């Protein structure tokens, strides 16, 4: 006797829904961008399978690839978020500022000041010649 097993199929509709929610996109917006009704989006999100052409369009609006939707896993997402939070040094590694921003502000201020002084000199010389 065989016992019923869960289907190994991925539920693409749920993945689309979850990515949409994470991205902060409403069904209405997705529907407008795709030129369909909100009810159609709801049906798509309830479907286990989605046509490749429609999946590509949805992926484009969501700002991800169709492959990313197919391979989406909340567990992996949570893992990455936790690692980036716990290993904050990863951000420090990528941020390599080689100058002091305040020095740049002072430099800009000095250039503006010099420019204004030049304008004053030009105006003074222009008025003296008349």
Image: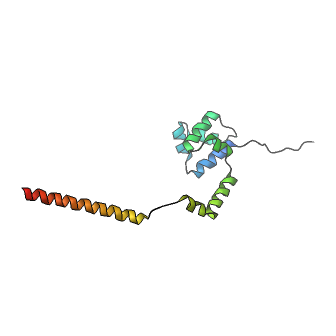
> Residue at the spot x=64%, y=64% of the render?
86
- Looking at the rendering, which quadrant does residue 47 occupy? top right
3 to the left or right of 24: right
Q: Position of residue 67 (x, y in %)?
A: 65, 41
129 to the left or right of 68: left
Looking at the picture, tell me which residue is in the foreground, 101 or 63: 101
Q: Position of residue 24 (x, y in %)?
A: 55, 51
Whether residue 115 is situated above or below residue 19 in the rendered picture: below
Q: Quadrant of the N terminus?
A: top right
Q: Position of residue 42 (x, y in %)?
A: 61, 42
Whether residue 51 is situated above or below residue 111 in the rendered picture: above
Residue 107 appears anywhere in the view: yes
Q: Quadrant of the C terminus?
A: bottom left
Looking at the picture, tell me which residue is in the foreground, 46 or 115: 115
> Residue at the spot x=45%, y=62% of the render?
99
Which residue ends up furthest to the right in the rendered image?
1
Which residue ends up furthest to the left in the rendered image?
130
Q: Position of residue 18 (x, y in %)?
A: 63, 49
């Amino acid at each position: 006797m065989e016992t019923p097993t869960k289907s190994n199929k991925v539920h693409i509709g749920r993945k689309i829904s979850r990515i949409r929610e994470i991205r902060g996109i409403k069904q209405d917006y997705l529907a407008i961008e795709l030129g369909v009704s909100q009810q159609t989006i709801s049906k798509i999100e309830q479907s286990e399978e989605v046509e490749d052409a429609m999946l590509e369009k949805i992926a484009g609006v969501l700002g991800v690839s169709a492959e990313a939707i197919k391979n989406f896993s909340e567990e992996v997402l949570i893992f990455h978020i936790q690692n980036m939070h716990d290993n904050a040094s990863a951000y420090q590694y990528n941020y390599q500022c080689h100058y002091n921003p305040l020095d740049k502000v002072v430099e800009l201020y000095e250039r503006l000041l010099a420019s204004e002084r030049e304008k004053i000199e030009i105006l003074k010389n222009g008025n003296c010649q008349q």
